[in-house]
Image (spheres, helix red, strand yellow):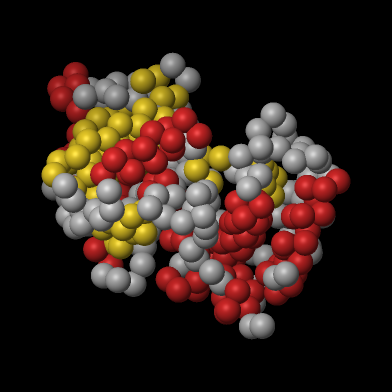
Amino acid sequence: MSLESDWRLDWPASSGQRLASAAIKADPAHFQVDEILELEGLLAEQPADTLTDGVPGSGEHLFIRVEKRGDNTDYVSRELASLSGCKQQDIGFCGLKDRHAITRQWFSVYRPGMVATDPVFISAVEERWSVLAVCRFRRKLRRGEHQGNRFDLVLTHVSSDRPLIDQRLARLETQGCPNYFGPQRFGWGGNNLRQAARLRPGKLRGRNSRDGLYFSAARSWLFNEVLAERVALGNWHRPMTGEPAAPGPTGPLWGDGGTQAEGAQAELERSVVGRHPRIEHVFSQTRMKPERRPLVLTPDELTWRWLDATILSLSFTLSPGQFATSVLADIFTIRDLSCGAAGLAEGA
């Protein structure tokens, strides 16, 4: 069997089948994401109008919270670097946010000794995006440093029986769903996996290179395959014998030595990964230690209401690294209207 035929990008729901179909992103306003960030006692929600008294806080990095629509995170970071006259690697952010959405997130811009010109820079940013808040901080914003993301979503073209959907959502609120990486992690049509299969073990150029992106995609895909096996066995929501991170069930983020699990769990994980030798080989000399990721995703503060018989509004909060599309896909067969019938766009 060719590797391409192994690249499934749609994994089984917790109940074995999805209950209904629905569409997302009929309008960018139907997919809104608010990044939640608080650093070391500095509540970074300083209103932008405090600029009349100067930028609050201190340090070499200007933190700026922007609302964007139609632009992805990488593009905004490049433009901020250009506007400020710094290198792109001097721009920090916590995570990638979707292009086809309204998203509010923080960026840090390295501006040592430039406090006096911050208002000029911020005015230039405001010509492109809404600036919601600003502050100064002593270090760069790091990936995954935020506390989470708040999602406000509107699903349209919802099919199936409303009481059944309500029942499934209530179960999701208490029991959670499989914590899959979203298919957007794997590139268009699995392209990141194709690239990962071509990597030469021991020759990776680092996690911040394109190789790092492909390596991460391969790691994420193997995790999803192991989780899918656990879903099929019906034991994804409880630890197995050999679980290294009790009390909650986890799955492998593959590395040198493969997995940290032992016993029956290690046997299962190695068996699943062994079915995909051209992906497994990437990890033979990575110098990257194995890690673990929870198998269960339970959205916080989940609420929902029906706007009419086929339109459903949902709100919930997820931890960093969790995917809203994975929450939805446990109940719905999702059609992303921002990219036609081709599949899901970049995740938030």
Residue 160 at least partly seen: yes
**Closer to the camera in the image, 160 or 40:** 160
Q: Quadrant of residue 104?
A: top left
**Would you say 305 lies left or right of 239 here?**
left
Q: Position of residue 113 (x, y in %)?
A: 36, 33
Q: Name which residue lies at 50% across and 73% down.
A: 191
**Would you say 123 lies left or right of 211 here?**
left
Q: Residue furthest right?
A: 263
Q: Name which residue lies at 46% across and 56% down.
A: 17
Q: Position of residue 171 (x, y in %)?
A: 44, 35
Q: Quadrant of residue 189?
A: bottom left
Q: Name which residue lies at 69% across and 29% down.
A: 247
Residue 67 at least partly seen: no
Q: Is residue 165 above or below residue 137?
A: below
**Closer to the camera in the image, 246 or 40:** 246
**Closer to the camera in the image, 92 or 226:** 226
**Closer to the camera in the image, 343 or 334:** 334
Q: Quadrant of residue 151?
A: top left
Q: Position of residue 253 (x, y in %)?
A: 67, 51
Q: Position of residue 156 (x, y in %)?
A: 20, 53
Q: Is residue 90 above or below residue 34?
A: below
Give the number of callouts: 0
Quadrant that contains the N terminus? bottom right
Q: Is residue 17 above or below residue 291?
A: below
Q: Residue furthest bottom?
A: 2
**Would you say 144 lies left or right of 1 here?**
left
**Would you say 229 lies left or right of 144 here?**
right
